[in-house]
Image (tube, coloured by chain):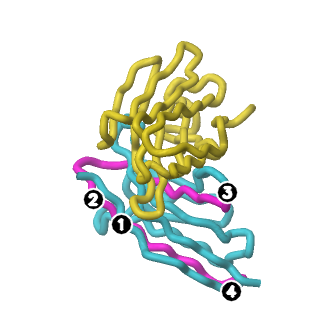
Chain colours: A yellow, B cyan
Amino acid sequence: KAGVTQTPRYLIKTRGQQVTLSCSPISGHRSVSWYQQTPGQGLQFLFEYFSETQRNKGNFPGRFSGRQFSNSRSEMNVSTLELGDSALYLCASSHPLAGGPNEQFFGPGTRLTVL
Amino acid sequence: GDSVTQMEGPVTLSEEAFLTINCTYTATGYPSLFWYVQYPGEGLQLLLKATKADDKGSNKGFEATYRKETTSFHLEKGSVQVSDSAVYFCALSLGNDYKLSFGAGTTVTVRA
């Protein structure tokens, strides 16, 4: 079974631009979560989608948004990029019956650099 | 709020040494507890988990026991290998919430 895939793996943008990251969950998984990983703040939860609905949201500004499609693929968007948005963005998918409660399977991440 | 505190690193060990990484948590309910591992250049992989008090999670020689009385979930391995070099994260989630709250991570380096 293929794992969680994220595209692109690396991205370089400049301040003020916007960016869209994509995540394809494991087949059959309907929950997709996004996390931001930085050296200073560690791993922080951005949001979680299930069946195209955002169920949970972390403490990030409105510049960070996401969506989920009917095939469970998800995208996250960051508008008006700031230098502090440079991070590894991780996507995780989950299925209620896969390994018990709340086990999440992570993708390799998208490394975003904002110049 | 819910949070996880884990031992600061980095930790450097010789092969076959004993590893322990401390993890304590604060939660409003009864969380599920996890250890994730991140190898260089990769995403996170679930190492082990425990969903209720006194549960012991184990995998690949690693163990951790859910201690409600001390709100702890310390990770241990009796004999580490060079291949265990990675960053280890303790995490919790509550109920059916898919949100994970992570500790800061502990970098472990094992030398041959």
Q: Chain of mark 4?
A: B
Mark 3 to mark 1 CA distance (whole Å): 24 Å
Mark 2 to mark 1 CA distance (whole Å): 8 Å
Magenta region: which residues?
B15-40
Q: Amino acid at mark 4?
A: Ser
Q: Which residue is mark 2?
A: B26
The image quadrant of residue A8 is top right
B89 left or right, relative to B26:
right
- Foreground of the two, A86 or B25: A86
Q: Amino acid at mark 3?
A: Gly
Q: Amino acid at mark 1?
A: Thr
Mark drawn on residue A31:
none
Q: Which residue is mark 3?
A: B41
Task: Kindly give the residue lying farthest to the top in the view shown.
Answer: A70
> Which is closer to the viewer, label 3 or label 2?
3
Mark 4 to mark 2 CA distance (whole Å): 32 Å
Q: Chain of mark 3?
A: B
At 73% from the left and 75% from the top, the residue drawn is B81
Q: Amino acid at mark 2?
A: Thr
Q: Which residue is mark 4?
A: B14
